Amino acid sequence: MSELTSKTIAQLRDGFRAGEFAATEVAEAFNAAVVAGRALNAWTVETPELALEAAKAADAARSSGDLKPLSGIPLGIKDLFCTEGVDSTTASKILTGFKPTYESTVSGNLKRAGAGMLGKLNMDEFAMGSSNETSAYGPVISPWRRNDGGNAALTPGGSSGGSAAAVSAGMAPGVTGTDTGGSIRQPAAFTGISGIKPTYGRCSRWGIVAFASSLDQAGPMAKDVRDCAIMLENMCGFDPKDATSLDLPVPQWEAGLSSDLKSKRVGIPKEYRIDGVPDEINAIWDKGIDFLKDAGAEIVEISLPHTKYALPTYYIIAPAEASSNLARYDGVRYGLRETPQGGNLDAMYAATRAEGFGAEVKRRIMIGTYVLSAGFYDAYFTKAQKVRALIKRDFAEAFAKCDLILTPTAPSAAFGLGEKMSDPLAMYLNDVFAVPASLAGLPAMSVPGGLDAQGLPLGLHLIGKELDEQTVLNAGLAIEERAGFTARAEKWW
Amino acid sequence: MSVSEKEVRHVAKLARLALSDAEIDKMVPELNNILGWVEQLGEVNTDGIEPLTAVIENHTRLRDDVVNADPLTGGGVRDDILKNAPDAQHGFFAVPKVIE
C-alpha cells in the first residue's frame, strides 16, 4: 500500500484538512490501487472519473472553506446500491446493463457528505451467499493467504466480499456493505477489518436492491472502529421513502467514542459455545472477554435459549421475502429479457428468470415460494415468525442483565474457494453467530480479534441493545486498542 | 414433509422459473435436505406467541394526499421509468403479444 492508501478515513480527512495532501492525490492513489488489484476481482464497475470529480470538488471546497464531513474521501459502494447513471448489477446476470435513473438514499447521503465513488463492489448474487462464490462475475479472491505456503485462493466472505477485500487490500479506505444475516460482519471477520450493522431502520433501504426486507440493513466496513463511526453517521437518517425508516436523530457516534467500559455489563451467551467449533474460535472469544474486562466491563453469563433455532428460522423467512421481492425480475421493466421462439408472456417470464438467476438464487426462490404456498404457509412461514418473536424476546430478557453481548463472529477463519460450495447447509452454518442479531434487528459489529494458527484473521462480534450503536462501537474500540491487530495481507496481487 | 418431483415442478411454475429436468432432479434432494433441517422448528412451543411482523417498533406513516407529494413517486417520470426497459414502444412497456 502506498502511504495514502494505508491511511484510515480519519487520517485522510484530517490530513486533507490540514493541507498535507490534496483530495485529488488521494483519489489518484486509490484509483491506481483499484487497477493494481484487479486480480482480486473485487469490483464489478470501476468509476475513477467519479472519484476524481468529487476530489476536485473537495479541493475547491477546501480553498473556499466549505468542507463537508467526508470531503476528500473516496469510497467503494457495494453493487447492491442503486447509483444514478452507473451500472447496478447486484452481481446478477438478470440486471446486466441496468443503469438506475436514481440514487439509493444511503449512497446519496455519502455523496452529499462529500465522498467520491471509486466503483461498485462485487458480492454474492442478490446478497445470497457467505463466500462470494454465487456472483455472476466470479468470486472475489481474498487478499489473505494461509501461511502454509500453499497459496490456496481463499474467500473474503460474503455477501459483502468485494467490500471486505477492497478495504483489506487498500483499494478503498471505507466501503458500504449490507447485512441480512451477517453479510457485513462475517466478511469483515474473514479479512481483518471492522464492520457494523446498525439497528434495523437506521439506514434507509430505499434504492438498495431488496433481498429480505425485514432483515436487510446497510452499514459501513472500514479499517477501524472510528472509521465505521464516521461512515455510519453519514449513512443513517430518516427517509420518508422507506416505510421502515426510523424517524430519529442520528447520534454523533464518532464524538461519543470512548473505550472506557466501567459500569458496563457484557453478557456471554452460553448457547453460543457450539460443538464442533474449532478451539481457536473459543480461544479468541476468551481473549475478547479478557479485553473487555481489562476495559472495565463486568462479565455476566446470559442465556439465549432459542439460539439453536435462529438459522432454520432465517432460512424460512429470508427466502420467503426473497421470493416475493425477486418476483419483480420478469424481463419487462429492466434487465435481461429472454423470449423463447413463439413463446407467450408467461414463457418469457419463466425463460428470463431461468436465464438470469444463478443456482443459489433459484434455490432460495424455490424454498421461499414453497414455504409461502397454500397449505404450507402456516406450517413454515407463520411458525418461523413466531420463533423469530421468541428469539427477539430472548435478547430482550438478556439485556435486562447486560448492556452488550460478546460472541465470535464466525465459526471458522476464511475457507478456500470451492470448499463448501457443494453443500448449501454447510455454507449456511457460516452465519450461525451472526443471524440471531439480524432476526432481532439489533446493532452488531465485528472487529478483528487476532490471527489463527494459519495466520488468518478471526473476528469478535458485539451485539447491542436496539438503537445503542454507541456501546457497540465503544466496546469495539476497547477490543481494537487491546488486540493491537496490525496484521495486513501480504501483497501478492 | 418432503417434496416430490411433481411438487417441485409445481413450485417452479408458481415461481415462474423454467427449470430443466436436470435442474429439477438436482433440486428435489436439495430442497428436501433444507426442508428437513428447518423442520426442527416443530420442537419449539409457540402456543400463544404472536408472529413477529415488525422487528423494531415503528409508526406507520402516510404521505400527504396530494399529487407530487413526493417528486420521486408523484408522476411525470415516464421516460425515467422506461429508460431501462428491454423493449419500450410509444411510451409503454412492450411485451410479447398476449391477445390474439
Image (cartoon, helix red, strand yellow):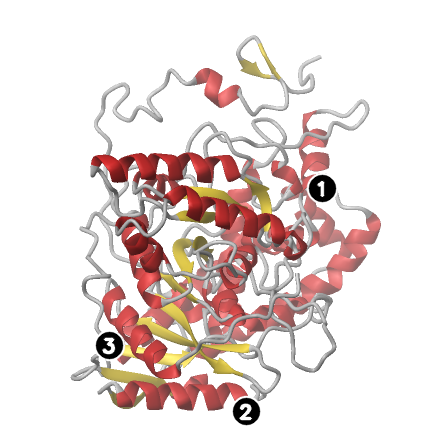
Distance from Cα at disc 3 to Cα at disc 2: 28 Å
Confirm whether circles 3 and 2 share one chain. Answer: yes
Q: Position of residue A342 (x, y in %)?
A: 80, 22
Query: What is the distance, in whole Å, between disc 2 and disc 1 at their CAs?
Result: 43 Å
Residue A198 seen in the figure: no
* Marks 1 & 3, CB-CB < 8 Å contact: no
Residue at the spot of label 3 = A259
> From this viewpoint, is residue A450 visible?
yes
Q: Nearer the viewer, mark 3 or mark 2?
A: 3
Disc 2 target residue: A279
Q: Earlier in the sequence, mark 1 or mark 3?
A: 3
> In the visual, does A456 lie left or right of A203?
right
> Residue placed at 60% from the left, 73% from the top?
A414
Foreground residue, A384 or A238? A238
Could you say which quadrant of the image residue B75 lies in?
top left
Residue type (three-letter) at the residue carrying disc 1: Ala
Q: Within 10 Å of the Cα at label 1, are there few (<14), some (14-19), or many (20+) other Cα atoms?
A: many
Sort mark 2 into few (<14), some (14-19) or many (20+) by Cα contacts within 10 Å: few
Residue drawn at point x = 26 percent, y = 40 percent: A62
Going 67% across and 45% down the picture, which residue do you hit? A357
Secondary structure found at label 1: helix
Using the image, name the chain to which the residue with label 3 belongs: A
Q: Which mark identifies residue A354? A: 1
> As displayed, is residue B9 above or below residue A302?
above
